[in-house]
Amino acid sequence: MNVLLDTRLPRTLDAWVQSMLADGRPGLRIDAWLFEGLAARRAAEQRLAEAGIAARFHSAYKPLVHHFQEEVDLAGLASVTVHCPVHPMASARRFALEAYPLAEMLAGVELQLVPQTPSEATPCHEIELRWHDGRQRTDWVFAPNRVHQDVLFNTLLSPCAWMKITQGEAPVTDGARPSDYEALFRLAMDTLRQHPWPATEPCFERLDIRIDLPGVAATAESGAPWVDLHEALHEDLYFSLLELFQQRSGRPPGDRRLQPGQIVPDVRVSEGEVGLRIGLREYPAPIADEAAANDMPLDRITAPLGFARIAQELAGIPGQRFEATSRQGRAVVGIYHPGAGPAVIVSGGQHANETSGVVGALRAARHLAAQPDAHFALIALENPDGYALHRELCAHSPQHMHHAARYTALGDDVEYREHAPFHEREARYEALRLSGAALHINLHGYPAHEWTRPLSGYLPRGFELWTVPKGFFLILRYRKGWADTARRLAEHVCGRLAERLELMAFNAAQLATYNTHAGELPFEVIHGTACSLSEVDRPGPALTLITEFPDETIYGGSFVFAHDTQTAAVLAAVEAIGLISPSP
């Protein structure tokens, strides 16, 4: 490995405690905000209290949610009104979104999120609390943020560390402070921005960014809000680096054709150490997967499949086998099953951290293969290199989204690859050549909990609509002249999905939470399922039905529910295309 940086930083919490102990002035009152978990913050407060220093350490990340967890008696709570800050350097709903998942935490409580008058002041929430026993209280929750420029010179408003110290009634200090969390991000970005990269893509095979730090790590505790600083740092580093390389190459922001190489932020929980190591290396050799050991029926699988089990399932589907080869040398396996019915292409795993679609594609293909006229091409896993990275990262952080595994080993989105060598995309070309399908059913997923970029304006730039879950929904793209067919397809699929009562309840609950925090969904809702229809001018089949289940990070019964839904959507779409004319 070519190591670009290997360094350790002081832990901010420890440094602040030492500084406060050394200060020694009597009568100080300290309020500090930093990126640490509750246990560490309370331990620091206790240590200072033993020295006669009154200090309170708050979370700089999602302070409103932490306030409800740590400072509010939720039992018997009747109503809550949160007056959310509105800052001119942020989205109008930024702080309503940051309040997620209050709507779920306060289920059964009347909740209103009311925007304040826009102000450039440092944000502060005003909360009106009322309990059933008549108690009332007003709390103010400070939300430390700073206006700054990112590495692309965008002006942003982002959470930051902060310290307020008073002595008696007199202020001693009140302002933003540097922190280990922010310093790690800035140091990584500066190191990679200043590195002399090659003039042409790809710039590397694999870029490893290993970070160890303490802080807030989420647990699978039922009902607890998902707050994980390590996952959030992974996300912010990955997408910030995509933006950096897009800028270097002269590409527009969000260009999915970018091929920098494989960017791998690996952010792990430490007991106190704060470390950063950045290195370049060649792709690791593909490792033989474990045997398809478990014999659990496919329709009861509770976690993403291993490569061996995927291969085993593909071997049981009759048809003509075809293959492409990924950048790292893995097989992208397809099955063409000819029949008298209208042809469809079914695919999963284009974005490899969206894993329920792989199971859904295999299950649907099994059902279709048993039908006498079924005509389909199957690519159950389009992006095996990304899938391998997802499995690697999940070995130590199984409940993180791991968007670093979303794209291919080249760093691009396989759907947007326009120039040879096409690698994985050859499988799609062959599926279309063999089948002549007018419909591609492309199974996807998205985060099952909140997705943030805390040091780059909080909301994930370019993906703001995906910040919080909104149930299972559909995206239907069609070529000119196919609008009527697309509409009939959407109506039929959504009608079939409406027969699934558990799914309808799931969608309704998630849409209600989404509406509370994000506002009205800009999608049409058809028979209880959100659906976006749009005309496009892109190569491939005339119709593309994209399914979106919030599957990133789910396991157990939730994962079964996800691939049940994916399977049902495929079968409904195949049924629909058989009932309506496949021609415009």
Image (cartoon, rainbow, N blue to C red):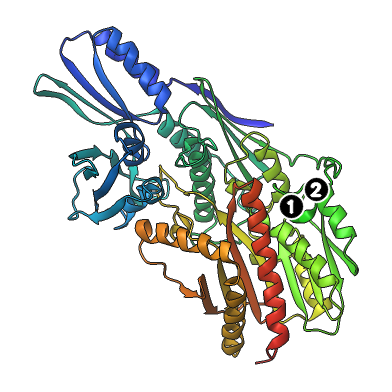
Q: Is residue 395 left or right of residue 371?
A: left
Q: Is residue 29 left or right of residue 313?
A: left
Label 1 crowd (10 A; few <14 / some 14-19 / many >=20): some
The residue positioned 85% from the left and 53% from the top of the image is 311
Q: Is residue 134 visible?
A: yes
Q: Are marks 2 and 1 in contact (CB under 8 Å)?
A: yes
Mark 2: amino acid: Met
Residue 324 image position (x, y, % from top left):
82, 61
Near-viewer residue (84 or 390): 84
Q: Vertical placement of 487 versus 352: above or below?
A: below
Near-viewer residue (351 or 187): 351
Q: Is residue 412 visible?
A: no
Q: Is residue 191 left or right of residue 24?
A: right
* Residue at which label 2 appears: 296
- Residue ranking furthest to the front: 133
Quadrant that contains the N terminus: top right
The residue positioned 82% from the left and 50% from the top of the image is 309
* Residue at which label 1 appears: 300
